[in-house]
Image (cartoon, coloured by chain):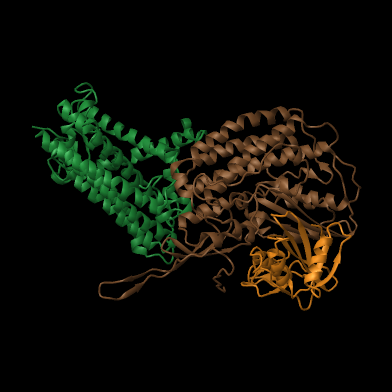
Amino acid sequence: MIETVQQFILALLANELVVAVILSVLPLVFVIIYTLVVLYTEMKVAAHIQDRVAYMMTGWHGILQPIADMIKLLLKEDIIPEKADRILFRVAPYVTFAGSYAAFAVLPFTSIYIGANIHLGAFFLIASGSIVVVGILMAGWSSNNKWSLLGGLRSAAQMVSYEIPTALALVIVAMITGSLNLQEITKFQDGGIHNWLIFGGPFPLKTKLLLLPFTLITFIILFVASIAEVNRTPFDLPEAESELVQGFFTEYSGLRFAMFYLSEYANLFVVSALSVSLFLGGWSSPFGSVLSGPVWGIFWFVSKAYVLVLLQIWVRWTLPRLRVDQLMYVSWKVLTPWLFVCLLAVGAILVSVE
Amino acid sequence: MTTEELLTILQGTFTDAIVGSKLSALQPWIQIAPNRTKEIGIFLRDEPSLQFNYLSCLSGVDYGNGMFGVVYHVNSTVLKHSIVLKVLIPRDNPHVQSVSAVWRTADWHEREAYDMFGIIFDEHPDLRRILLPDDWDGYPLRKDYQVQEFYHGIKVPY
Amino acid sequence: MKKVIQQSVTLPTDYTVTPGSITTSTGKTLRTEEMIINMGPQHPSTHGVLRLELVVDGEIIVDCIPHIGYLHRCFEKHCEHMTNYQQVIPYADRMDYCSAITNEWGYVLAVEKMLGIQVPERVEYIRVIMAELQRIASHLIAVGTYGIDAGAFTPFLYCFIDREKILDLFEITCGARLLYNYIWIGGVSHDLPPQFIDQAKEFCAYFRPRIKMLNELLTYNEIFVKRTANVGILPKDVALNYAVSGPQLRASGVNWDLRRDDPYSVYHKFAWEPQIGKGEVGTVGDCWNRHMVRMREMEQSLNIIEQALASLPPGDVHAAIPKRIRPEKDVEVYVRTETPRGELGFYVISDGSTSPFRVKARGPAFVNLSVLPEIVRGAMLADLVLIAGSIDIVLGEVDR
């Protein structure tokens, strides 16, 4: 019985190792194409917000520009500062990218495809996000530049503190769905827009209405925390251009710089995909069984994540940046307490319903 | 308050420190002694009927005849009157008392005058070059200034 | 290099930021050390080539020592070496390149005062219109780059779209867009072209709602207010002691505008008000108020422009001036004007020849910058960027 892509490829090639290699390369292809698309979108959306046209010369409406940028970055000279810690400096971009790439293993792209169907999927995702911090700290420290160091430290502080709201939101979802496997969580919400957790989940109407405000708040908080997790405005302090030049990757150039870029955009997708899987029904169609199926699943999953990415771009080009202490304030004194309230409320509702 | 009235007041308070004046000029000025500037400054600033709380400009001048000058344009934002004070000092011993303790704005102005003319402001908290590099030779706004040939191996006159 | 960390002597501001010390459970005291970092001269938010030597304790600034002079070209020496008085005007343009017209005007007023020239009324009106347009353009740069300092990129481009329209007005008048050489001794270089008045009126009508929009987008933005209110407070007495001028002084609550208090040209004929910081949000004298004063000044400038356009007298745009400008010997004047950045003073001495004997320019940005170390102590690194941005320095003028 062939149920998943893995089994299909396994049946085709009959070699576990080859399957593993193919499956680990597949998301990479996706990440690169996706990054190009988002780069293009970001520039065009930003230009639209700012009343200008962005690039128009390379290809139709500048559609080839991200590719040109990519090529340019690959061809650039790779500069390592003389006083840098060479090993750490070289390794840091790959650690960062590995961290954000690892998360793709547990993202359920569609009902029949998930890289690794492990039971602690969401937990693994959070954990792999922490590896990014290690990479950023390595980059900040090894550059031997005080601005980079400040950027790295800020980033570490920020990502560690914003993991707490993310994890708490995850706990709330786990309480409702009874699982940490993102595939299971998605399946739990299958069957139409009214079943999504953001709208209270697939419960009888009374329970649903009781849960609705809390899940909605949790989703908003998760979204805010996810912007902070990927270091974008208004939480882009680690690379705050006006303050820290380019933060932790000030000294990087060429391919290594591109790796940071790639990991940033990969991360952007990961956090959006997490929000989508947890609250917006993942790959499930908003119209119940209409337009559903494995292929439509990919479409829904990617486009839902894309909408969230668009939202993040919109926020980015509208708002100023917070200061470092205000950032901490938001995380510890606003988001976390609210999540505790939601946690208690959801727990109480679930217990009382049973 | 006109310069004439101010001159009378100043002469009444600091008889020996008021060296001269030119009331017929387009903008009349009063010349004071270089070692009394701070004292006069404090008086001008704190006297309730004068309240010269705003030092607009402090300029160094090389008169080219062996004399340097320091010109203070002071005015009051409360009483809206102004005064021009002048100090003349010999070029071979250009020492003036700093007024940066009276008006903190004089700090940078005096550093600039030092940078450009080599006028030394006694009691200045931090007298070093401000616009030019610390190891620059000479004082560019002196009338007899000759530019140095090389600066760190870079040819200066072009 | 000699490192002199200044202690303020007579000022009321004192901060008690000392490097922290931590006592461990075993009773040992660990002392954290200060870090010296160098901000600039190639740093994105020093608005040019300002270099700040910062002593920081983590992200908190213990001391800040500005080093200037990277753009120094000795404007004053250039002036002495000109062959005539007019040649200085383009150099004056290049001092504060964001508001060139107001610079030339300051210098030209000084020379006119030396010569006792009375310019025709039309010239005065044109100069006022141009200077106020320039003030708006300059404030737009200040506000826009301030947005960038705060991390908001979009307002910057909005500001530049509007500034472009002002530059178009300059372009149809004198052909130049940045450095105009427009105001001449005894007049202006070109009369206003026929379409100017309509186009300028159109701009005024267009720009008023834009100010509102900018206020909504940036000034009253929650995050922006959080970032700027109560940051970098410059008390009134410190501001006066440092002879800070322009919007920065007015934001500290001092009602002092040279256009009104040391009147020149025809400003007294128009109805307008100097804008002072009111402290609606935060404290009087903080970054937000400095920003807000600029926003409100743009509206006042629009008022002046509209009135001047409505009552523009006809006539010639050149006064009768001697062919060779040669003031009498030993005439000296100090003329100050209100540029977008504050009091720009020109102290000109003549020796009876055709070129000035000494020109001293008192740049507002130079003096305004000198107060920076006083107000950043105890602030955070991110605040420093905003404080420096709120001073609105143009390094061309600081270094001259």
Tell me if residue B44 comes above or below residue A58 in the rendering.
Answer: below
Q: Is residue A100 visible?
A: yes
Q: Which chain is green?
A: A
Left or right, A210 with respect to C173, comes to: left
The residue shown at (32%, 58%) is: A91
- When asked about the image quadrant of residue A143, the answer is bottom left
Residue C306 located left or right of residue C318: left
Q: Is residue C226 left or right of residue B110?
A: left
Identify the residue shown where x is 46% and y is 66%: C16
Nearer-the-camera pick, A27 or A307: A307
Q: Position of residue A302 (x, y in %)?
A: 29, 33
**Residue C191, horizontal then vertical, whole percent:** 80, 35
Q: Give how far across and how far down residue A337 sits, in percent.
A: 27, 46
The hue used for chain C is brown
Task: Report the number of numbered marks.
Answer: 0
Quarter of the rendering containing residue A121:
top left
- Residue C199's x, y, as percent? 69, 29
**What quarter of the picture does the C terminus of chain C occupy?**
bottom right
Front residue (pair A191, B12)? B12
Q: Colour of chain B?
A: orange
Q: Which residue is at a point 30% across and 38% down the rendered structure image?
A: A220
Location of residue A304 with respect to B24 vertically, above or below: above
**Which residue is at the far bottom?**
B93
